Image (cartoon, helix red, strand yellow):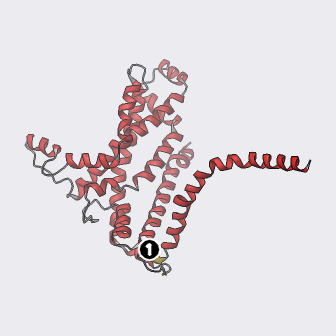
Amino acid sequence: MESGISKTKKNRLSEKLTPYIFISPFYILFLIFGLFPIIFSGILAFSKWDGIGEMEYVGLENFQRLIQDGDFWGAVSNTLIIWVLSTVPMLMMALILAFTLNLKFIKHKETLKALFFLPNVTSVVAISILFGLAFSSQTGLVNAVLEMLGIESINFVRDPFWVKIVIAFIGTWQYLGYNMIIYFTGLQKIPKDYYEAAIIDGATTFQIFRLITIPLLKPIILFTVMMSTIGGLQVFAEAQILVPTNPTAEGGALTIVYYLYQTAFGQNVYGYGAAIAWGLVVIILLISALNWYLTTHRIKGEK
């Protein structure tokens, strides 16, 4: 009798534990590759370590250095300029493309969505190499076209202004279709009655877009703005592929993450590299909070 009761308890315990066993790989991987690096980087930010010897606690020394570091603020400036040049026009074009694709007279919508989304599933390294070849100062396709038009060739990679344009263009090209798909999905959820009523009332396409589409897509617009902000401020691979050696803040290609990579993994200064990472976290939080305010609270105040 007792053995039967014990078996029943074991079966119940097994039934309770089984779901947790199946989901445990996710949490184990998260603890190893997610939570642990965050905690360890927090410890590193207050330490001095070259990756081999013993850690030395230095308090706020790394953050004091960060505030006074001209290269860091130059990298911040480059990153913000690239983010503005890439994210703002990209989101606007994505919304316009989604609205246009949602119109009734547009055919082959699935094919068009697949074509626009294709760059997003392509390796960012491959895309950066492709654009690096296209904008090469010597054998690049863009300069070849400029010379055919009688325009002097441009050293896109070495020019501080143009290298930001190229990096921003890579980000725009890669994520335009992704955001367009998100907006298009949101447009599909808007009741058609709103559009039909607006057409009956004589509203133009622009009025429908401004007075119906944009207000009803506010939550989705907020999501894309927040995600594009987080991703845009972490730009690295594009800059690293275009300028693989000796990047400088004055050269235009040194972004925050590139500076972090150069400091931590190039110079083996892991403590200060961790401080740069946490500085980036603060910048992302501040800009995300500003975006949240501009897209929600300010609109509510105007109402």
- Is 32 on the left-hand or right-hand side of 61? right
Question: How many labels were placed on the picture?
Answer: 1
Residue 246 visible in the displayed image: yes
Report x, y in % for residue 278: 47, 66
Task: Farthest residue to the right: give it.
Answer: 1
At horizontal 45% and vertical 53% (from top left) the residue drawn is 230
Residue kind at label 1, given as amino acid type: Gly
**With respect to residue 127, does 262 lie above or below?**
below
Disc 1 is placed on an element classified as helix
In the image, residue 213 above or below residue 173: above
**Residue 126: image location, x then y, percent:** 30, 46
Q: Can residue 211 be seen in this view?
A: no
Estimate the x, y position of residue 47 in percent, counting from the top left: 48, 77
Residue 192, given in percent of the width and then of the height, sits at 53, 23
Q: In this view, does 194 lie above or below 47?
A: above
Residue at the spot 38% in from the left edge and 61% down from the top edge:
257
Q: Which residue is drawn at 39% across and 74% down?
A: 269
Q: Nearer the viewer, residue 176 or 24?
A: 24
How packed mark 1 is, by other alpha carbons closer than 10 Å (few <14, some 14-19, many 20 or more), is many
Q: Circle 1 sits on which residue?
A: 271
In-front residue for pair 121/94 = 121
Q: Quadrant of residue 80?
A: bottom left
Q: Which residue is drawn at 37% across and 64% down?
A: 261
| Quarter of the image that includes the C terminus | top right
Task: Report the side of 175 relative to 241 (left or right).
Answer: right
